[in-house]
Image (cartoon, grey):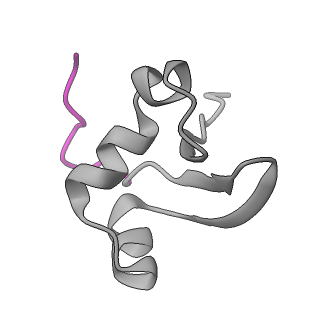
Amino acid sequence: MGRRKEDSPEPEYAFYDGDEFIDLGTKEQLQKKWGLAAKTLTYMAAPVARKRGLKRLLYRIEEDDE
């Protein structure tokens, strides 16, 4: 898996609880706002969390390079 370039912005994530949209922000912002551990957020964004049926998930927002 590639690393971010130092000058590139932090990726943003959409935070969902089931089908309900909860919030949008970087992992750091979501960690502070919702009191979740960094490891928890990383797990919530991983494909394995969706496969296991985790209710609270993060989806990375992809930016289009135009």
- The residue at 68%/28% (across/down) is 66
Tell me where residue 38 appears, x and y as whole percent.
23, 59
In the image, residue 34 sits, relative to residue 49, either above or below, namely below
**Of 53 and 29, which appears nearest the observer?**
53
- The residue at 44%/70% (across/down) is 30
Q: Is 35 displayed left or right of 63 in the figure?
A: left
Tell me where residue 48 appears, x and y as whole percent.
41, 21
Residues in magenta, as a range: 1-9
Q: Is 30 displayed left or right of 50 in the figure?
A: left
**Of 56 and 63, which appears nearest the observer?**
56
Question: In the image, is residue 10 part of the stretch drawn in magenta?
Answer: no
- The residue at 76%/59% (across/down) is 21
- The residue at 51%/53% (across/down) is 12
Q: Which quadrant is the N terminus positioned in?
A: top left
Q: Is 35 displayed left or right of 20 in the figure?
A: left
In the image, residue 57 sits, relative to residue 65, either above or below, namely below
**Of 20 and 53, which appears nearest the observer?**
53
Tell me where residue 8 appears, x and y as whole percent.
33, 46
